[in-house]
Amino acid sequence: MNPSAKNNSNHAMVSDHIRSILPKLVHPQQGKLPYPTLGVGYGQHYAGYIYCWDNHHMSLRFAAGGEPDQMKWFLGNMLTCQTPTGFIPSIINISTGGIGQVGPWHAGPWLAQNAATHLDLTGDKAWTAEVFSKLELYLEHWTARHAAPHGLFRWREAYHTYDNEIVLSTCSDPDSILSPELNSSLYLELRSMSFLAGAIGETEKQREFLQRADVLKDAINQWLWDDELESYGAHNLQTGQCQISHSSTLDGDVGSLSSDVGRFAYLSSPALMPLYAGIAPSDRAERMIRSYVLSPEHFRSPFGIRSLSKASEFYNQARWGNPSRSGDRRRLTNSNWQGPVWIPLNWFVFHALLRYGFTSEARTLADDTQNVLAGCIEQFGYMRENFDAETGEGLYADHFASWNILADIMHDFLPGGEAPFRLVF
């Protein structure tokens, strides 16, 4: 079978599988949540909860299939659990409501983007006006409780980012690490709030949110970019350096390491988010994409985008990730973000490649995304949540859906396709 025919066959297999499982993911209203919910899977893993960023991306796929109300219901259930301080649990128990994990984990910065996409699809300004003040309060909780120096923001616990992402899980205190992933997502939230405000006639707030987004963008480009390595990375407040090389954790003592050892130890997937968000100037984006994103020695695997550079000494394909050295060691069995391919990373990088003019490379990544899922479906009859970056083997969580269900619409965003929604930011 020639490559084109194989890609077409795998596309059909993935599309048929996703369409067949969509009805299994929809659950009626129950417990304290007033609206229907989407399950992350249809097996034993992750059952009974709403997971903020999983369900955000799932609701996009349902909207693409003609069910934009799933976006409205997702946001409605999240906002139902909001406290007077603006806090919303990132994980919500479907039956009982409230927080579903250790510690005060605020909803991930995706809610305003969800509302903006829903508004753009439906034109429902009345509903937007109803939820706008709650979204403002949710975002102010982010900016007030997670503020950091340099006009940036930080996670409060290592596991609030990707489960065992290497920078936060290996360095000392999460409060000292300013992640490009979080700051890029908050930038998109501010831009989305500006879009929402403009739609409902709040012109002053529209300007204010856009100005705040621009200030944050400038801070990201100033503090989270490494000129020498030409990549984004986390900023370590303890060393005052961008956290890509291991030597920057040793109080500046590079004499104990060669120029190669540890050079890319912390070149991790959060560094890719400024590309997805369009924060990177075109010259920076092109250098980073060519040097790292498309490089088989760093992020580009035959099966998609690695969650950690292959050149990192921490790179591994374990089924379960390592526990955080500074966080909750009960999280030992969380699935691994220290190397394996994850479909949301493929999704983010796919759109980043399109944004910066790498159309052919985006098409190939969309093909590879469907091919790795097709291999898993052919072997097991279902998708798993992450994949060995060297072999394509599905690693963990049987009968998984979540953001994987976006895979069959990636090609629709390519030139000549009919994109089912816009990334309005």
Image (spheres, grey):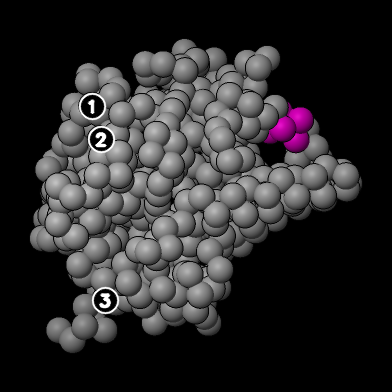
Could you tell me which residue is drawn at 48 percent across and 70 percent down?
284
Could you tell me which residue is drawn at 68 percent across and 14 percent down?
84
Is residue 134 shown in magenta? yes
Judge left or right: residue 151 versus residue 377: right
Q: Earlier in the sequence, mark 1 or mark 2?
A: 2
Of the numbered discs in the image, which one, if any, rests on residue 325? Answer: 1
Q: Is residue 251 above or below residue 226?
A: above
Q: Amino acid at mark 2?
A: Thr
Could you tell me which residue is drawn at 44 percent across and 78 percent down?
358
Q: Is residue 293 above or below residue 113?
A: below
Of the numbered discs in the image, which one, if any, rests on residue 3? Answer: none
- Mark 2 packing: few (<14 Cα in 10 Å), some, or many (20+)? some
In this picture, which residue range is highlighted in magenta?
Answer: 132-136
Q: Secondary structure at mark 1?
A: loop
Marks 1,2: beta carbons within 8 A: yes
Q: Amino acid at mark 1?
A: Arg
Distance between mark 2 and mark 3 Cα atoms:
39 Å
Q: Residue 419, image x and y in percent?
A: 55, 68
* Residue to which mark 2 is pinned: 170
